[in-house]
Image: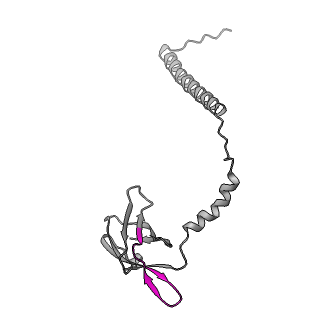
Amino acid sequence: MKKINKMNPEVKQQLIKIFSILFALFLTLVIALGFKFYYAFSTNEPAIAQNYYEVGKDYDRYINSKKSSDNRQLTSLPDISEIKRGINQIKFQYMETSDHSSTGIKNGKIQITLTRRATLKGQILKECITDHKGECSIHFEIPASGGRYEISLHANDKDGRFTTKEMIEI
């Protein structure tokens, strides 16, 4: 017995179209991989830096340079946890502490960053320079939507730094 396969011409055209698209996609993939291999073998850049050991030893120095100085203190009024929706004003005092006394740090740079991790539009960055008493004020506005914010406080001067981070619900 002989099978006769008669396919509808419309179905045949659709199958040819589908397989042509799949072949084109496969061919594009092969060309892209070929270019990637060509580029990888034609460049002489190593995957690991030649001085990786020295860079690793430098890592401890880098980490220590980002830590807060032991004799620095940053206070705020009102407290950071009391930030609310709408317009806020925070007064900072940047102090150098010793065993028995504290003195204000003049010309210290204080930076506050409020980041809303849920959206890309939620970052507020403000800074101020301290006066002779070590004080400065920052004004900013929290949008009506509120939410969870990560607050980063950085205070720098020529002899030290203070850094802290915390999360608050606004």
From the viewer's perspective, tell me whether residue 159 is left or right of residue 48: left
On whether residue 164 falls in the magenta region, the answer is no
Residue at image position (55%, 78%) is 70
Q: Position of residue 92 (x, y in %)?
A: 38, 77
Residue at image position (41%, 65%) is 114
Foreground residue among 168 and 132: 132
Q: Which residue is at the far left?
A: 87
Q: Which residue is at the far bottom?
A: 100
Foreground residue among 89 and 170: 89
Residue at image position (54%, 75%) is 69
On whether residue 102 falls in the magenta region, the answer is yes
The answer to whether residue 92 is above or below residue 127 is below
Q: Position of residue 56 (x, y in %)?
A: 67, 57
From the viewer's perspective, tell me whether residue 78 is left or right of residue 42: left
Magenta segment? 94-111
The answer to whether residue 55 is above or below residue 1 is below
Foreground residue among 124 and 138: 138
